[in-house]
Amino acid sequence: MCISYGIIFGGNSTYSNIIFKIQKRVIRIMMNVGNRESCRELFKNLNILPLHSQYILSLLHFVVKNLNMFKSNSVVHTINIRNSSDLYLPSVHLSKVQKGVYYSGIKVFSCLPSRIKSLSGDVRKFKSALERYLLEGSFYTIQEYFDWNLMTNPSISY
């Protein structure tokens, strides 16, 4: 399934839930299971990322390939803060900006476990580790991704 083309721009839209339901229907047909059967384990068994996990993968791949476009907290803040190595999240009020690639990318990247963030210098290793992580979580929503990361690393705030 190649639904990842252009997902970085449309993966956070209102239509993404419709596409996700179609993706689950296709998975159920492929695996010959009923409509009420959960697809989470089916995604894992087939090594296919759910739509929102594909969105996160594309978003973070963009961030890592373009790290020079982003500021770190250590550049913005003169004092030593706890998350100085994280990317700086600018204060914005428009929801259109908050749903954009730049802002969403920073927010999603900041929520990553440190072991994956530390690989951001090597795009290939980073993407491989991130794919494994996203497949393990098999996230159905962006909020599920944030909540799961908060459970595993309570020091994160977003």
Image: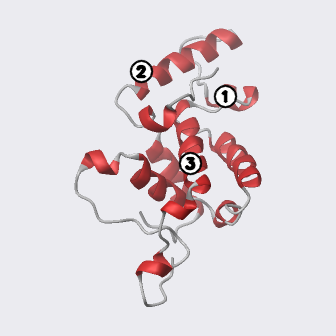
Using the numbered discs, state the Cα–Cα distance from disc 3 to disc 2 in whole angstroms.
Answer: 24 Å
Q: Quadrant of the C terminus?
A: bottom left
Q: In which quarter of the image is the N terminus?
A: top right
Rendering coords of residue 88 (x, y %): 43, 69
Rendering coords of residue 125 (x, y %): 77, 53
The crowd level at tag 1 (other Cα within 10 Å; few <14, some 14-19, many 20+) is: some
Q: Which residue lies furthest to the left in this view?
A: 93
The crowd level at tag 2 (other Cα within 10 Å; few <14, some 14-19, many 20+) is: few
Using the numbered discs, state the Cα–Cα distance from disc 2 to disc 1 in whole angstroms.
Answer: 17 Å
Amino acid type shown at disc 1: Phe
> Would you name the residue on which mark 2 appears?
18
* Residue contact at pointers 2 and 1, CB within 8 angstroms: no
Amino acid type shown at disc 3: Phe
Q: Can residue 16 be seen at all in this image of the molecule?
A: yes
Where 18 sits versus 86, above or below?
Answer: above
> Would you name the residue on which mark 1 appears?
43
Circle 3 SS class = helix
Q: Which of marks 3 and 2 is nearer the N terminus?
A: 2
Amino acid type shown at disc 2: Ile
Instruction: Give the left or right position of residue 128, taking residue 109 as reference.
Output: right
* Residue contact at pointers 3 and 2, CB within 8 angstroms: no
Q: Which residue lies furthest to the front in this view?
A: 68
> Would you name the residue on which mark 3 appears?
62
